[in-house]
Each structure stands twice: as C-alpha cells, then as structure tokens.
Amino acid sequence: MTSIARSQRLVSFRSPNDAWFGPSLFCPVDRIILVKNVSVWNNGATASIIQVSAITALSVYAMAYKESLAAGAHANVDVWIALNPGDQIAVYTEKAQCFGWVSGAVLNGGPTITPATELSGPREPFENEAF
C-alpha cells in the first residue's frame, strides 16, 4: 500500500450555536485515514463540552477528544485512530464559539483485513486468560 507522505487537515470547525453537531468526514472506499491530532479552543463565555469522535458504520465510537473545556481554554491532544472506508469523524459542541482542528494522514488503498466486530461472534478464552 502506498501512502500520501504528509499529514493534512481533515476537519476544521467553529460552532455557530449551542448543541451543535459539526462536520463529518467519511473515509472513502479506497483510503484509510489516520487521525493524529485534535486541537480545540473554547472562545465562548462559559465552559463547553467538545467531542470529536471516530464512528464506524455500526455506530461504534472511538473518542479522540471529549472534555468540558473552560471558557478561553485550549487543548491539544495527540491520538492515533485508524478509519476504514465508511468510518467517519464527527464533531459535537455543547456551546457556541468553540473552534477545532483535526489533522492526520490519508493512506492510499483500502484495508487489507476485515476488522473483528461484535458481529464476528463470541470466541473461546485463550489458555491462561484471566477474567
């Protein structure tokens, strides 16, 4: 699989109103997206929950960022979440005037394996597996 060698902006946003569901970026059929960094800023007058998620077609979430950010505060987190075709990055802010930037890399080619999901069925415990 060849890749595009550089990182890029995947999603940027500014919430215009309260309880705002922001842009979604869907991973195309012939690509894999690596989410590497989330940077958020609350420019509003009160604290706001800001959530940036990766979501599969089966509504399974991986939380890239979810915090109540104080007014005027900024957060920057490094993450490593791989999106397969059909997966998406989604944004939610509780209050208006929250800004964000999500960056990562886009790799050419689709997945080389089928990921295990809850639809794959139960498995037997491994030898010496503790519960």
Image: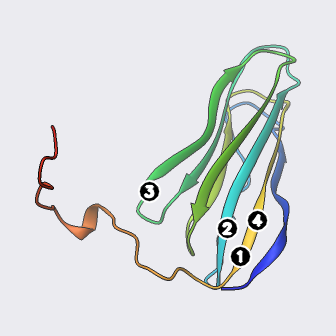
Q: Are marks 2 and 4 in contact (CB under 8 Å)?
A: yes
Any mark on residue 33, and which?
A: 2
Q: Earlier in the sequence, mark 3 or mark 1?
A: 3
Query: Does residue 93 sit above or below 118 in this rendering?
Result: above
Q: CA distance from mark 3 to mark 1?
A: 23 Å
Q: Is residue 54 visible?
A: yes
- Which numbered circle lies on residue 59? 3
Nearest to N terminus: mark 3 or mark 4: 3
Residue type (three-letter) at the residue carrying disc 1:
Leu
99, above or below 37, in the image: above
Residue at (78, 14) in percent of width and height: 46
> Disc 3 vs disc 4: which is toward the camera?
4
Q: Amino acid at mark 3?
A: Ser
Residue 26 in sight here? no
Given contact means CB atoms under 8 Å apart, are the residues at marks 4 and 1 in contact?
yes
Q: How many marks?
A: 4
SS label for mark 2: strand
Task: Tell me the distance, in whole angstroms, between the alpha carbons under discs 2 and 3.
Answer: 17 Å
* Mark seen at residue 105: 4
Q: State the mark number for residue 107.
A: 1
Q: Contact (CB < 8 A) between labels 2 and 1?
A: yes
Give the percent coordinates (x, y) of residue 5: 83, 73
Q: Secondary structure at mark 4?
A: strand
